[in-house]
């Protein structure tokens, strides 16, 4: 897909911004707010997809950003990668099972199709997982910022593997985080 170099009133590049919305906003959520509110609307059409109506989601809605809620349930949205139980293989399988049967990935694929989305931007780790899977299934590019300073432990290696497998581009906030995602 070629991005138009000039503004064409008949074409807008549809970008889907995916966010959990359940957790207290931090750097990644505020960055997403900034990105969406500073897009050139003559070229880009932002579409927000979220699971919970959090502070940032409410702010974007007030700004008139088109938004779609895909509910996932608290057993999916209240999980954070730093929690110790993510080291448990049974927990990971149960989580993936719940995620699959929530229907969220398939609902997201439908949104991608119906809105001719050309790029998915993921705002948090859950969004990276869901957006990455839906993006791969739909052949839509997926980009995300990585704000996490993962360690070279089991969790870090799992997260790096998921990111490298599911995301087309990972933008990092520091040289240390960039080196963590270098392969080879």
Image (spheres, helix red, strand yellow):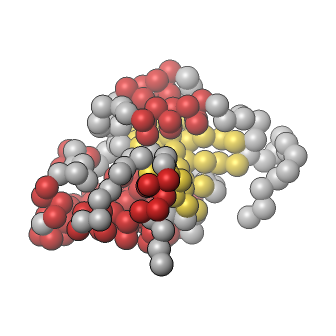
Is residue 165 depicted above or below 115 in this figure?
A: below
28, 149: nearer the viewer: 149
Q: Where is residue 178 in the image (x, y as percent from the top left)?
A: 48, 58
**Residue at image point 71% right, 34% down:** 41
Q: Can residue 39 be seen in this view?
A: yes
148, 70: nearer the viewer: 148
94, 33: nearer the viewer: 33
| Number of numbered labels in the structure image | 0
Q: Is residue 55 left or right of residue 89?
A: right
107, 122: nearer the viewer: 122
Question: Which image quadrant for residue 92?
Answer: bottom left
Q: Where is residue 165 in the image (x, y as percent from the top left)?
A: 44, 72
Split into 4 quadrants, where in the image is the N terminus?
bottom right
Q: Is residue 73 visible?
A: no
Question: Which image quadrant for residue 97?
Answer: bottom left
**Residue at image point 18% right, 60% down:** 86
**Residue at image point 31% right, 45% down:** 71
Q: Position of residue 101 (x, y in %)?
A: 26, 63
Is residue 40 depicted above or below 81 in this figure?
A: above
Q: Where is residue 75 in the image (x, y as percent from the top left)?
A: 18, 50
Question: Which image quadrant for residue 131?
Answer: bottom left
In the displayed orientation, state which residue is furthest to the bottom: 184
Q: Is residue 118 left or right of residue 149?
A: right
């Amino acid at each position: 897909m070629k991005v138009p170099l000039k503004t064409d009133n008949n074409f807008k590049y549809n970008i889907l911004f995916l966010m959990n919305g359940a957790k207290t906003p931090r750097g990644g959520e505020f960055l997403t707010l900034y990105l969406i509110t500073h897009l050139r609307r003559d070229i880009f059409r932002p579409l927000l997809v979220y699971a919970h109506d959090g502070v940032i989601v409410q702010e974007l809605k007030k700004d008139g950003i088109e938004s779609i809620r895909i509910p996932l349930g608290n057993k999916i949205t209240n999980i954070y990668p730093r929690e110790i139980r993510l080291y448990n293989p049974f927990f990971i399988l149960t989580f993936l099972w719940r995620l699959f049967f929530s229907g969220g990935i398939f609902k997201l694929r439908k949104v991608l199709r119906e809105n001719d989305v050309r790029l998915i931007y993921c705002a948090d780790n859950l969004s990276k997982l869901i957006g990455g899977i839906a993006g791969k299934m739909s052949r839509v590019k997926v980009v995300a910022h990585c704000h996490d300073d993962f360690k070279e432990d089991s969790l870090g290696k799992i997260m790096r593997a998921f990111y490298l497998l599911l995301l087309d581009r990972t933008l990092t906030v520091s040289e240390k985080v960039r080196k963590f995602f270098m392969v080879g």
